[in-house]
Image (cartoon, helix red, strand yellow):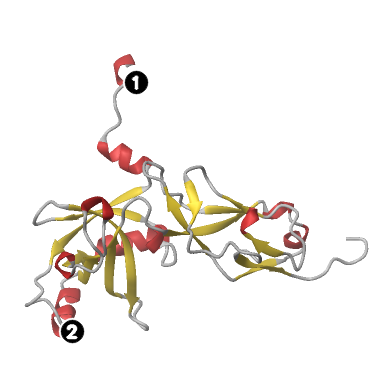
């Protein structure tokens, strides 16, 4: 169908292209649904307590203004689905359009402060911080081309000091799923720094990261030394 080829992308397609995920929540009463007892009741009902907080320069919300802290409760099945999709470590690097069911208001947010039960591996609490273009976001680092590293071909590995890179993403640029770390040619005892990162267009390193004389340290390559004839 020729006509369908030129159709404008839907809102869902635009969101997907920007690496934005959808989630919904419910408003939580700050008086009757606050405190440890109320939180236990919510969790038994399949709802995880939390808040939406933080400033949003695009909406004129100051981060110190407490009236914009919104108590919410999020269906736990949505949170477990997000954890299964992204993992615990990268959940807080994912951007969500979070809809409050009672009002229909959509907040663009990043998950923050995930608390898990130490034994039962169940979610206790999860908050969300408002996101706007220009807010620094930590993006996971993904090694690539390990097969082209002499050290890694001998069973070497990276001892990480930083698994995430704090970045600023320009407005209209998709938030990367990860920042790639080029491993080609890595030898044992190589110290990994920013110059090996492949940073996409429209993404820059946060000014809060030290870019001085020693630059920001990712980690080091460890493993056994090469033997003669290898």
Residue 170 vs 141, above or below: the answer is above
For this view, does 103 lie left or right of residue 133?
left
Q: How many marks?
A: 2
User: Does dot 2 land on a helix, a strand or a loop?
Assistant: helix
Percent across and percent down for residue 209 are 52, 64
Percent across and percent down for residue 150 are 78, 58
Q: Quadrant of residue 61?
A: bottom left
Where's the C terminus, which quadrant? bottom right
Residue 83 vs 172, above or below: the answer is below
Residue 97 vs 166, above or below: the answer is above
- Which residue position is annotated with label 1? 5
Where's the N terminus, which quadrant? top left
- Which residue position is annotated with label 2? 36
Question: For mark 1, does the 10 Å Cα neighbourhood hold few (<14), some (14 to 19), or many (20 or more) residues?
Answer: few
Task: Please state which of residues 177 and 191 is positioned toward the viewer in this rendering.
Answer: 191
N-terminal of the pair, mark 1 or mark 2, is 1
For this view, does 152 lie left or right of residue 55?
right
Residue 179's label in the rendered image is: none
Determine the residue positioned at 64% across, 61% down. Answer: 193
Outermost residue toward the front?
A: 212
């Amino acid at each position: 169908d020729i006509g369908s080829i030129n159709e404008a992308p839907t809102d869902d397609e635009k969101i997907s292209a920007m690496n934005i995920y959808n989630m919904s929540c419910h408003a939580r009463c700050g008086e009757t649904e606050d405190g440890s007892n109320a939180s236990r009741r919510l969790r038994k009902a399949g709802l995880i307590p939390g808040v939406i907080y933080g400033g949003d320069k695009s909406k004129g919300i100051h981060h110190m203004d407490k009236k914009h802290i919104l108590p919410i409760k999020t269906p736990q099945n949505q949170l477990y689905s997000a954890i299964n999709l992204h993992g615990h470590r990268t959940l807080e690097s994912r951007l969500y359009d979070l809809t409050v069911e009672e009002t229909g208001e959509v907040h663009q947010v990043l998950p923050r402060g995930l608390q898990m039960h130490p034994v039962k591996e169940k979610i206790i609490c999860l908050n969300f911080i408002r996101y706007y273009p220009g807010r620094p976001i930590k993006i996971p680092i993904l090694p690539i081309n390990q097969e082209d590293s002499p050290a890694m071909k001998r069973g070497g590995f990276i001892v990480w000091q930083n698994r995430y890179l704090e970045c600023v993403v320009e407005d209209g640029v998709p938030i990367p799923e990860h920042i790639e770390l080029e491993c080609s040619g890595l030898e044992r005892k190589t110290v990994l720094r920013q110059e090996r990162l492949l940073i996409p267009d429209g993404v820059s390193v946060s000014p809060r990261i030290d870019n001085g004389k020693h630059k920001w340290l990712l980690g080091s390559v460890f493993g056994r030394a090469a033997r003669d004839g290898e």
